[in-house]
């Protein structure tokens, strides 16, 4: 149902004063940070957050510090008017959409570095990525001052990094994780899916099929993680043009790779695959492998 168009705020200081006023009035603030290019994955986070808030804020900010050299910062989809409309339909009251210059003015020199879990998987493939993510999330939380913040399971390692950071830095905000929203054929929704050619789009559901194959193998017990990843690799290689960057079966807590038989513990199966110049990631979290 169409609702009011959200207020758009571009100034970090004005956003803070607005948050102060809401807090003074006893309002509960929920927050959904995004980089825009909003799709149903994002709006599902927003609709969930709507139920848990008096005031719902979403941010749209393509954060330069989390993109590496040669990544898609320049071409990342920017469509603020459309995003504001969609956010409004999902119940957002205010869209915070700062300019890069307002977030990182001349002389900016402070970064948040989370150790350990940031060096594997996405962190290994994209050096500096999580430093940028942890930094911008800290800034956004300080600007929007929410009581509760929503993230997607789609970016499983991002969730792990932010949980670690919030814990380590005593950030007193509730974090809610929302399950991955998929297209009917299984492809995880992503702002980057629009880069895919028709051919690549038709091949891309193999990523979720491979994750499901890995999950079935692990749930059967006995199977070594290394054998399960080999089968997943073969499935992707034989049925798509995707170039596998990594396929991982890891301890869901530490993100350390598992190679042998998987014992009863939460496991994260994750992958990154390139279709041409488009890099897709996806994952399945198995709470307990043998159940
Ligand atoms: P992004 O705009 O890609 O930075 O994503 C903003 C938030 O939306 C992050 O917390 C993502 O994990 C989440 N998100 C993106 N795609 C999905 C999806 N398909 N399902 C659930 N959450 C998602």
Image: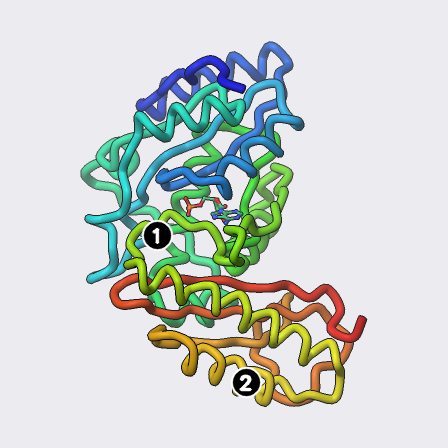
Depth check: 261 or 186 in front? 186
Depth check: 35 or 276 in front? 276
| Quadrant of the rendered image containing residue 240 | bottom left
Quadrant where the C terminus sits is bottom right
Q: Disc 1 designates what residue?
A: 192
Position of 27 compared to 197: left or right?
A: right
Image coordinates for residue 45, horizontal then vertical, percent: 55, 38
The image shows residue 213, relative to residue 197, as above or below, that is: below
Residue ID at (63%, 42%): 176
The image shows residue 14, relative to residue 183, as above or below, that is: above
Image coordinates for residue 145, horizontal then vertical, percent: 51, 28
Residue ID at (37%, 34%): 60
Gap in Å between the C-alphas at discs 1 and 2? Answer: 26 Å
Number of marks drawn:
2
Image coordinates for residue 71, horizontal then vertical, percent: 25, 59
CB atoms of marks 1 and 2 within 8 Å: no
Depth check: 76 or 144 in front? 76
Position of 201 compared to 247: left or right?
A: left
Q: Disc 2 designates what residue?
A: 231
Image coordinates for residue 153, horizontal then vertical, percent: 57, 53
Task: Name the element at disc 1.
Answer: helix
Residue ID at (31%, 25%): 81
Looking at the rendered structure, which numbered label has been put on residue 265? Answer: none
- Badge 1 density bin: few <14, some 14–19, many ≥20, Cα 10 Å: some
The image shows residue 158, relative to residue 213, as above or below, that is: above
């Amino acid at each position: 149902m169409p609702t009011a168009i959200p207020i758009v705020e571009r100034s970090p200081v004005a956003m803070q004063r607005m948050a102060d006023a809401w807090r003074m009035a006893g309002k509960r603030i929920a927050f959904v940070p995004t980089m825009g290019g909003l799709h149903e994955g994002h709006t599902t986070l927003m609709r969930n957050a709507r139920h848990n808030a008096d005031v719902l804020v979403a941010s749209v900010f393509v954060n330069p510090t989390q993109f590496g050299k040669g990544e898609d910062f320049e071409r990342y989809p920017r469509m603020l008017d459309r995003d504001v409309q969609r956010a409004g339909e999902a119940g957002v009251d205010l869209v915070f959409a700062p300019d890069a210059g307002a977030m990182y003015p001349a002389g900016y020199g402070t970064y948040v570095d989370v150790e350990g879990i940031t060096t594997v998987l996405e962190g290994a493939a994209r050096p500096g990525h999580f430093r940028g993510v942890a930094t911008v999330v800290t800034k956004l939380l300080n600007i929007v001052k929410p009581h509760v913040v929503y993230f997607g399971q789609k970016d499983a390692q991002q969730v792990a990094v932010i949980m670690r950071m919030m814990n380590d830095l005593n950030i007193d905000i509730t974090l809610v994780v929302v399950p991955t929203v998929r297209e009917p054929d299984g492809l995880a929704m992503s702002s980057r899916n629009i880069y895919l050619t028709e051919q690549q789009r038709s091949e891309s559901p193999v990523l979720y099929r491979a994750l499901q194959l890995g999950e079935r193998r692990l749930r059967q017990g006995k199977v070594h993680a290394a054998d399960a990843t080999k089968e997943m690799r073969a499935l992707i290689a034989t049925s798509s043009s995707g170039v596998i960057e990594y396929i991982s079966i890891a301890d869901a807590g530490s993100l350390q790779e598992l190679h042998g038989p998987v014992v009863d513990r939460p496991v994260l199966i994750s992958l990154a695959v390139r279709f041409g110049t488009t890099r897709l990631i996806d994952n399945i979290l198995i709470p307990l492998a043998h159940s």
